[in-house]
Amino acid sequence: QVQLVESGGGLVQPGGSLRLSCAVSGSIFRIITMGWYRQAPGKQREFVATITPSGSTNYADSVKGRFTISRDNAKNTVTLQMNSLKPEDTAAYYCNVNQPPRTWDRMSWGQGTQVTVSS
C-alpha cells in the first residue's frame, strides 16, 4: 500500500499557473501508473491525468493542452503543472494509483491539495 502526500495548491487568478506535487511512499512506485484526480464541492471525483512508469500520459479532455503530468521515479514524486487555469478547475486535487472509477470509494486517499481559481 502506498502513502500519498499532495502539496502545491493555492489561490490563483484565472489564466494563472500552479504546480502540484505528490510524494509517494513505497518501492512499487516505479512500476505503477499514477494519476491525478480532483473533486469539486458537490461533485463526484473525476479523472484529470495519468502517467505510466515509462512516461506515457493521458488527460481528461477538459485539461488537455493546459495541464502536464510528469514523474520522477528516482524521487517517487508525481507532479501536475497547471497552466491557463479556469474557475472550473477549482477543486481538491489528489494523486493516487491509477484504478478504475468503480474502485475509488474503496481506495485510500491522501489529504489532497486545494486549488481555487478566482479573481
Image: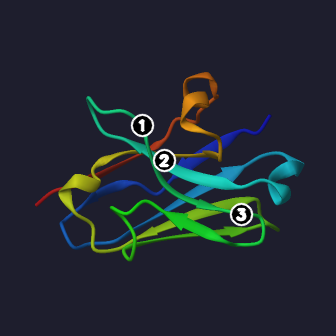
> Where residue 94 sits in the image (x, y, percent)?
51, 45
Furthest-left residue in this view: 119
Give the residue at mark 1. Answer: 45
Q: CA distance from mark 1 to mark 3?
A: 21 Å
Secondary structure at badge 3 equals loop
Q: Quadrant of residue 9?
A: bottom left
Q: Are marks 2 and 1 in contact (CB under 8 Å)?
A: yes
Q: Earlier in the sequence, mark 2 or mark 1?
A: 2
Q: Is residue 103 left or right of residue 54?
A: left
> Where residue 102 sits in the image (x, y, percent)?
56, 29
Residue depicted at 71% across the width and 55% down the height = 33
Q: Is residue 14 left or right of residue 34?
A: left
Give the residue at mark 3. Answer: 52
> Where residue 20 sits in the image (x, y, percent)?
49, 60
Q: Is residue 74 left or right of residue 98?
A: right
Nearer the observer, 74 or 108: 108
Amino acid residing under circle 2:
Tyr
Secondary structure at badge 1 equals loop
Amino acid residing under circle 1:
Arg
Give the residue at mark 2. Answer: 37
The correct choice, above or below, for 27 with respect to 16 in the image is above
Q: Earlier in the sequence, mark 3 or mark 2?
A: 2
Amino acid residing under circle 3:
Thr
